[in-house]
């Protein structure tokens, strides 16, 4: 079906050169096994001014993501 499990990002660029990063994290959370690797998934996404994170468990935000973005 073409599904892709992500622990990486994909940069989408329009004709004007504007970039958007789609960052995907494999299962990570309190209720799931923690397979996701945020540090790996965000590598190279810095080129995009807008980055969208897709994660399976909302608890991931408070447990890991918020710590990383507050340092930047």
Image (tube, rainbow, N blue to C red):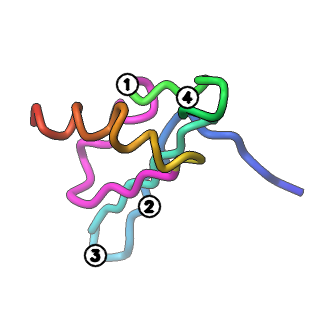
Q: Nearer the viewer, mark 1 or mark 4?
A: 4
Return the mark for residue 36: 4
Q: Which residue is mark 1?
A: 39
- Residue 17, image x, y percentages: 28, 67
Secondary structure beneath disc 3? loop
Residue 16 position within the rendered picture, expressed as x and y whole percent measured from the top left: 28, 75
Local packing at callout 4 (Cα closer than 10 Å; few below 14, some 14-19, many 20+) is many
Mark 2 or 4, closer to the camera:
4
Residue at label 2? Answer: 12
Front label number (3 vs 1)? 1
Q: Nearer the viewer, mark 2 or mark 1?
A: 1
Mark toward the viewer: 3 or 2 = 2
- Which element is circle 4 on? loop
- Mark 3–mark 1 Cα distance, whole angstroms, equals 29 Å
In terms of sequence position, does the residue under pointer 2 or pointer 1 come before the other?
2
Residue 13 part of the magenta-drawn span: no
């Amino acid at each position: 079906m073409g599904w892709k499990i992500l622990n990486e990002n994909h940069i989408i660029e329009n004709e004007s050169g504007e970039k958007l990063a789609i960052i995907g994290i494999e299962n990570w959370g309190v209720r799931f096994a923690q397979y996701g690797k945020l540090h790996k998934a965000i590598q190279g996404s810095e080129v995009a001014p807008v980055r969208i994170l897709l994660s399976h468990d909302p608890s991931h935000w408070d447990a890991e993501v918020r710590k990383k973005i507050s340092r930047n």
